Amino acid sequence: MRDERRIRDCLDTWRPGHTLPQEFYTDPEFYAFDVEAIFGESWLMVGFEVELPKPGAYLALTIGRTPIVVLRDRTGSIRGFFNSCRHRGAQICPDGHGKATRLSCPYHQWTYELDGSLMRARLMDDDFDPSDHALVPIHVETVAGAIYVCLSETPPDFAAFRADLEPMLAPFRLRETKLVHEVTLVEKANWKLVMENGRECYHCAACHPELGVSFPVGITPKFAQEEGERQRAYCERMEANGLEVGPRDGPWWQCARFPLNEGMISMSRDGKPAVAKPLIDIDGGDLGSFRFATEPHNFTHCLGDYVFSFSAYPVGPEETHVVGKWLVREDAVEGIDYDLARLMETWDVTNRQDRDLAEMNQRGVNGRGYRPGPYSPEGEAFVLRFIDWYVSRVRTRVGGPTLRVAEVA
């Protein structure tokens, strides 16, 4: 076990309401701690059920240094395993999407059933018991079509999150969608800088002109644009359509519906729908956005016509991989109901702008002149929430005073 006293001592210098000490964004030991204690102990949103359409379909990815695989078994259930052969530990499935009738290790061909049980191991002794060498399972939960995994033996409670998310997400019928585009950006920045950037719109008006066409860059921490007649009318219209506005918040999640800029129906270059067939056939898909976000690494926007999901995965002290996914109705036809380039344009350009901002942030944090600075209580409320959550999790592990995660004002 690494020496956690150094992390505790460094955290003791942190001032609430401020960015973290430099080591938390740069130091390899602190990065290794995050991979183990944060990503290894949290629920992570890794994708959607529609990415696993039939038995044998799998999604393999690496979280920190740990490869995992999530698949649909022969009964239609979704399972997850550590993607490591029980022989000599080789990674079985390459990262990405795939399909297999059984999982076969490419090294020595040990072969596993879709329930993880070992079916075949060549040239082993007579006393070898295959039942002792099944794949090691990981915790998997699904909610309204989204897939979450936890690598910990004892994961955080999921029930309260499900109770908040499911009724607000279910109307989008994600199990009746399809993944039409996925892109991974390599960002030369610590994962926390990537997420701090993704948790605020303090920078949006100046840095994201394309997003600002439709997205209310002056939105308040409660995802209410204003306390005026337009906001009240939006809430009344959503309620009449049976759609809860929220917000619903928990220790590591936020769920809220909010209107886009006036006259805008979707997050597109002109605010018009990017997909002709809406996900929810109400008011022509003019429903604003339903945003749900989970710590430490994800946010998702569900619009009337498409879904965009953002997930950040730590790869090194100063490297993060950001995975973006776009979903549309399963019967929408490319070239007829949507143009892929137009569909992905707003979020793709925004993500690339954010990559440049995070890398610029990292370069400045690396230098001798870095001093932790104060967050804006209004403009960076969700960043404050993220940092308070992170510090509380670190304190739970290394000791010291416990910080209660702040309620969003």
Image (cartoon, helix red, strand yellow):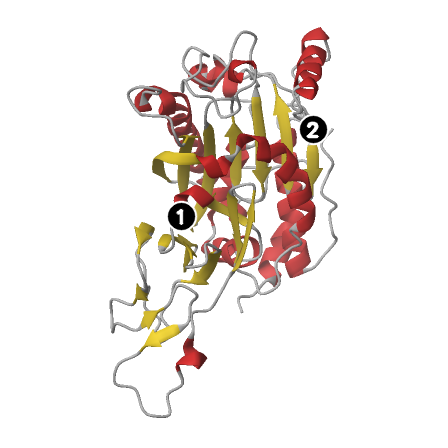
Up/down of 325 relative to 161, above or below: above
Counting labels gives 2
Q: Tag 2, which secondary structure?
A: loop
Residue 160: % across, % down: 70, 46
In the displayed structure, would residue 66 be above or below residue 258?
A: below
Mark 2 burial class by Cα count in 10 Å: few <14, some 14-19, many 20+ = some
Circles 2, 1 touching at the beta carbon (< 8 Å): no
Q: Nearer the viewer, residue 378 or 311?
A: 311
Horizontally, residue 161 falls left or right of residue 29, namely right
Q: Amino acid at mark 2?
A: Gly
Residue 323 locus on image (x, y percent):
40, 39
Q: Disc number at residue 188?
A: none
Taking the spot 51% from the left edge, 24% from the top edge, the residue there is: 303
**Residue at the location (64% across, 29% down)?**
256
Residue 321: image quadrant is top left
Quarter placement of the N terminus: bottom right
Upstream in the sequence, badge 2 or badge 1? Answer: 1
Within 10 Å of disc 1 (Cα), the crowding (few <14, some 14-19, many 20+) is many
Give the alpha-carbon distance from disc 2 to disc 1, as whole Å.
Answer: 30 Å
Secondary structure at badge 1 equals loop
Seen from the viewer's position, the closer of residues 118 and 310 is 118
- Residue 374 seen in render: no
171 vs 380, nearest the viewer: 171
Q: Residue furthest front?
A: 75
Residue 333 as seen in the image, left or right of residue 354: left
> Would residue 394 be seen by someone viewing this image from the given angle?
yes
Give the labeled residue for mark 1. 52
Image mark for residue 246: 2
Q: Residue at x 30, y 25 (%)?
A: 334
Amino acid of disc 1: Leu
